Image (cartoon, rainbow, N blue to C red):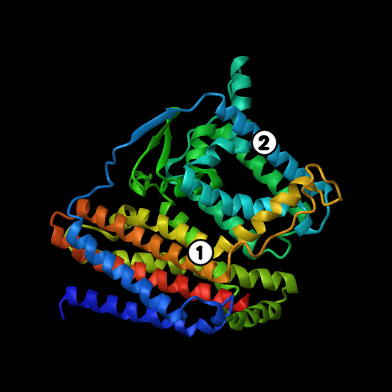
């Protein structure tokens, strides 16, 4: 069998798996099978067919790269007062949220801080970044404080005695560590909802960021070291909007990913983003429910306390999911290496890692959409009563959460649509990049058999996780 036929056979096998996996998990629907608009297995078939049709259409119609050097259209100049104003808002929200965590109620669902951190910050800024561009840069509180301090000391002629050059070998590894640390906090740590613990962690994080900015400079640290700045900037590269020199530009969707800096830690960061979301879904499903008790028992037998055993088991699960995502991506890249001479696995991994950005967003939106839509409404009553002590600052403390704002079937459509659109976008980016990597179009198309396998595999996993989570719900 030729390599081309082998690749095609692998794709067909994976397509079959995509159709089987959602059906196997269909008994675990969040809203129940009777509430789904069509049988769950049809979603798997439909998603797989859309990916294959997209692949064929790209091979037939997309003959030249279109996203590598996009044309940007300037829209308007952003007034200079916008940055200080947004920074002030970011600092104010940070101070209010931390104060609520320290002095407010211990009931996490009645305290502003947990909701603001886990819903509006962690999920909301991801969606806002894709729609509006890199908005977190404007509201980043530690950036605002760091720039203000830098401006103040500059006015009096004081220079930092500890300023160092940022090591190139360090790359984005601090950001990887920070995102994995937050994922561990959210998914593994047993006291994650305690407002006081969360407040002190927020203060500690801000102190570390300000110290790093003092050493390496605000702009340099923000670009590669600040975990959330780097994380949200990744998603903003999917947006049609980008800011350059105080001017807002419009560009083709997805094109911002093509000039993503390829430095140490770039692949690990995206694997951490996808892997952490994967573990979040897995940890609410039947597979983890069957494995987790044995892992906890293993650690308890080693002398760990109950809480420590829970956290150690979760740490193992999170690490396995992140490593699994990285291994699957590298497996596809190694397959691509067999097409056309002169390309190493490392080179191809770096050149195609940007294709994971829309997949990371697809996983995030699919998994957290219902959380954002429902729990995001809590901002209404928490704004009036941030400490949970009975105040009603804006007359909205009596507001509740309207769970009828969208139906269970509507959520399912959004989730599946996000997964399919994200993976089709990944195929588009991969095909566009392949046209620049390979000299012959035939080789570019052949190389993407492997990327099709990767995309269908990620889609299958995403659909299975959604079904499993729905069952746990």
Q: Which residue is mark 1?
A: 366
Q: Nearer the viewer, residue 456 or 265?
A: 456
- Residue 346, compared with residue 223, is above or below; it is below
Q: Position of residue 397 (x, y in %)?
A: 79, 50
Whether residue 172 appears in this view of the structure is no
Whether residue 458 appears in this view of the structure is yes
Q: Position of residue 311 (x, y in %)?
A: 66, 68
Q: Is residue 331 left or right of residue 368?
A: left
**Label 2 residue SS:** helix
Q: Which residue is mark 2?
A: 91
Looking at the rendered image, the disc whose residue lies closer to the viewer, 1 or 2, is: 1
Give the mark nearest the N terminus, 1 or 2: 2
Q: CA distance from mark 1 to mark 2?
A: 30 Å
Q: Residue at x 36, y 49 (%)?
A: 254
Q: Position of residue 243 (x, y in %)?
A: 43, 34
Q: Residues within 10 Å of mark 1 (few under 14, many from 20)?
A: many
- Residue 58, compared with residue 143, is above or below; it is below
Q: Residues within 10 Å of mark 2 (few under 14, many from 20)?
A: some
Q: Residue furthest top?
A: 156
Q: Looking at the image, how many numbered discs can be counted on the residues?
A: 2
**Label 1 residue SS:** helix
Q: Nearer the viewer, residue 210 or 163?
A: 210
């Amino acid at each position: 069998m030729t390599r081309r036929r082998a690749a095609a056979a692998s794709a067909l096998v994976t397509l079959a798996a995509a159709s089987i996996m959602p059906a196997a998990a269909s008994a675990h629907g969040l809203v129940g099978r009777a509430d789904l608009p069509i049988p769950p297995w049809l979603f798997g078939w439909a998603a797989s067919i859309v990916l294959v049709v997209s692949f064929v259409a790209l091979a037939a119609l997309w003959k030249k790269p279109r996203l590598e050097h996009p044309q940007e259209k300037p829209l308007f100049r952003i007034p200079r007062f916008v940055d200080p104003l947004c920074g002030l808002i970011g600092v104010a929200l940070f101070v209010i949220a931390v104060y609520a965590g320290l002095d407010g109620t211990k009931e996490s669902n009645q305290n502003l801080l947990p909701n603001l951190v886990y819903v509006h910050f962690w999920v909301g800024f991801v969606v806002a970044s894709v729609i509006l561009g890199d908005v977190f840069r404007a509201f980043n509180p530690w950036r605002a404080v760091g720039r203000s301090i830098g401006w103040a000391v500059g006015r009096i002629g004081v220079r930092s005695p500890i300023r160092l050059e940022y090591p190139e070998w360090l790359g984005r590894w601090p950001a990887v560590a920070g995102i994995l640390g937050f994922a561990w906090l959210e998914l593994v740590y047993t006291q994650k909802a305690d407002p006081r613990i969360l407040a002190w962690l927020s203060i500690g994080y801000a102190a570390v960021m300000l110290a790093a900015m003092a050493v390496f400079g605000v702009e340099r640290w923000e670009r590669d070291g600040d975990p959330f700045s780097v994380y949200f900037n990744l998603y903003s590269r999917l947006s049609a909007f980008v800011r350059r020199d105080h001017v807002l530009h419009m560009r083709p969707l997805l094109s911002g990913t093509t000039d993503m800096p390829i430095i140490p830690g770039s692949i690990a960061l995206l694997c951490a983003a996808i892997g952490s979301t994967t573990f979040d879904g897995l940890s609410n499903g039947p597979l983890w429910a069957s494995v987790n008790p044995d892992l906890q028992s293993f650690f308890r037998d080693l002398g760990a306390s109950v809480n420590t055993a829970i956290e150690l088991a979760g740490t193992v699960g999170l690490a396995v999911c992140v490593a699994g995502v990285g291994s699957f991506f590298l497996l596809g890249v190694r397959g691509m290496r067999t097409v056309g001479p002169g390309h190493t696995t490392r080179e191809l991994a770096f050149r195609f890692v940007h294709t994971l950005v829309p997949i990371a967003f697809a996983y995030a939106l699919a998994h957290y959409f219902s959380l954002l839509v429902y729990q995001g409404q809590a901002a209404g009553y928490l704004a009036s009563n941030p400490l949970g002590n009975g105040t009603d600052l804006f007359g909205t403390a009596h507001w509740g959460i309207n769970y009828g704002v969208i139906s269970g079937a509507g959520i399912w459509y959004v989730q599946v649509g996000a997964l399919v659109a994200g993976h089709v976008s990944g195929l588009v980016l991969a095909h566009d990049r392949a046209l620049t990597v390979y000299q012959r179009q035939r080789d570019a198309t052949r190389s993407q058999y492997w990327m099709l396998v990767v995309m269908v595999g990620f889609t299958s996993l995403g659909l299975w996780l959604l079904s499993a989570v729905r069952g746990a719900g």
